[in-house]
Amino acid sequence: MTRIADRVMKICDAEEANLQRQIASDPDAPEGTDEQLAKAKPFAEALPELAESTRKNLGGRLSPIILKGRREHSARSRSH
């Protein structure tokens, strides 16, 4: 299995700077303030019904190969 870092597209510094400028200029997605981030809750805690529904629905949509890989990765993570 390949690592995620091996599959991530590499970009140059100029492309990164351009992306950061675009992110900063987006009025619909401002950076969270320290106060907002301190109040943030995990998704499953903030919206438990939706989180449970999403968890159940994801299981039926993912291929068996992906589910097997997730279980193996989770088992390896717990053993370290």
Image (spheres, rainbow, N blue to C red):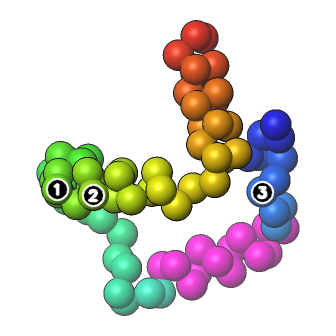
Q: Residue furthest top?
A: 79
Of residues 4 and 50, the one nearer the viewer is: 50
The amino acid beneath tag 1 is Glu
Residue 32, label in figure: none
Where is residue 70, by image quadrant?
top right
- Is there any visible trace of residue 37 in the rendered image? no
Q: Earlier in the sequence, mark 3 or mark 1?
A: 3
Q: Is residue 20 above or below residue 35?
A: below
The reply to whether callout 2 and callout 1 are in contact (CB within 8 Å) is: yes
Frontmost of labels 3 and 1 is 1
The reply to whether callout 3 and callout 2 are in contact (CB within 8 Å) is: no
Q: Is residue 28 above or below residue 62?
A: below
Residue span colored magenta: 12-24
Magenta span contains residue 15: yes
Residue 8, label in figure: 3
Pointer 3 local density, CA inside 10 Å: few below 14, some 14–19, many at least 20:
few
Per the image, the residue denoted by label 1 is 49
Query: Taken as a whole, is the magenta stretch helix, strand or loop?
Result: helix
Residue 53, label in figure: 2
Of residues 47 and 10, the one nearer the viewer is: 47
Q: Position of residue 72 (x, y in %)?
A: 64, 27
Q: Secondary structure beneath disc 3?
A: loop
Residue positioned 64% across, 77% down in the render: 19
Residue positioned 63% across, 54% down in the render: 63
The amino acid beneath tag 2 is Ser
- Is there any visible trace of residue 69 in the rendered image? yes
Residue positioned 83% across, 47% down in the render: 6
Q: CA distance from mark 3 to mark 2?
A: 30 Å
In-image side of 48 versus 69 (left or right): left
